[in-house]
Amino acid sequence: MTAHTHAYHGPILTLDNISMSFHGEPILRDINAQILDVIRPNMTQGQILGFYGRSGIGKSVLCRIMAGLMAPSSGTVEVGLAQQPVRAGMVGFVQQRYPLFDHRTLFDNLLVAAQRKYAPEAARQHVETYLERFCLAPHRKKYPAQLSGGQRQRAAIAQQLLCSEHLILLDEPFSGLDVAMIDEVKRLIVEVTTMDELNTVVIVSHDLVTTTALADRLWLLGRERDDSGQFLPGATICPRHQYNLAQLGLAWHPDVEAEPEFAQFVAEIKEEIRGS
Ligand SMILES: Nc1ncnc2c1ncn2[C@@H]1O[C@H](COP(=O)(O)OP(=O)(O)OP(=O)(O)O)[C@@H](O)[C@H]1O
């Protein structure tokens, strides 16, 4: 187990006292958490956050709040090195159905996204770059219905990266994929975070092992108990459930899943989840 040398710059994402209720029912409570810009010597190293919680606990709600698609009942979300309040469109959100425009080719789908951020010629150049990097260049003239599931997913990730500002949320990126495809998606996520220092991928997944193996930071969303053992209303990410995998020596190891320390860490996390 080796802790690779690293340091931190300013925050990339800050959740400040986020709470959310629907019709008086608390779903999220007092969430304070931050992703920092990680720096590794002589490397372009973005951030990967694993985000885990039981089914129905509030992960999708928090993702929508992080993406600026839903306003919290209280609290603020700030993104980027300038720490601006989040607005819809600043954060990419790749949902499970990979929505693309059916009547446009892959190239045109990506171009529409890129033109939201770049002038026309720069947009075309960025689309070319992403088609190459995501192994989609041979499929540029195909329509979404003519792409495989994996190609659609790569296209959806490229689309969100092209129009958002470095931060991208992936909702269940491994669900329904075979082993080879899971490896492909893992490779792609690592590729995204080595393309630009500020690129930050948030992986929301029930696949705890795969997510933890990729991440340099892990958040567990869970319910806390009061002194008498009763659950407090609403889920939160308490400080002890914000794990720094880089400091634990579990980040950026290609075969970390084979390391005994990793297995032990995952076992501990499972215990925490069972109790929350
Ligand atoms: N718009 C809404 N109005 C009322 N309640 C909502 C709304 N959106 C979500 N909820 C409730 O918030 C809770 C958390 O839902 P959420 O979809 O965030 O869970 P999740 O952790 O993403 O679950 P899963 O892992 O099963 O997808 C659920 O009880 C859900 O019914």
Image (tube, helix red, strand yellow):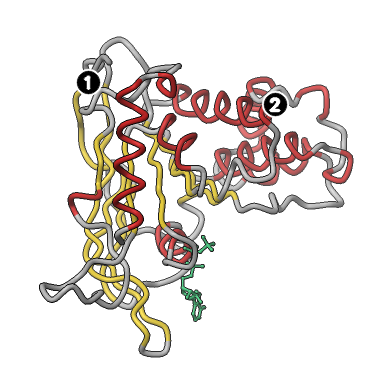
Q: Can you identify the residue that label 2 sits on?
A: 131
Q: Which amino acid does label 1 sit on?
A: His
Q: Name the front one of labels 2 and 1.
A: 1
Which of 194/30 is in front? 30
Where is mark 1, residue-wise?
6
* Few, some or many residues within 10 Å of mark 2 (<14, 14–19, 20+): many
44 vs 258, nearest the viewer = 258
Residue at the spot 10% in from the left edge and 72% down from the top edge: 227
Occupied quadrant, residue 201? top left
Q: Is mark 2 on a helix, strand or loop?
A: helix
Spatial separation of the CA atoms under disc 2 and disc 1 = 31 Å
Q: In this view, does 154 lie above or below 61?
A: above
Question: Which percent across, then down, holds residue 140?
Answer: 81, 30
Q: What percent of the width, then of the height, locates residue 249?
A: 25, 22
Crowd around label 1: few <14 · some 14–19 · many ≥20 (10 Å): few
Q: Residue at x 57, y 27 (%)?
A: 188
Q: In this view, does 58 lie to the left or right of 175?
A: left
For the C terminus, the image quarter is: bottom left
Instruction: Name the residue at 69% across, 38% down.
Output: 177
Front in this rendered view, residue 60 or 193:
60
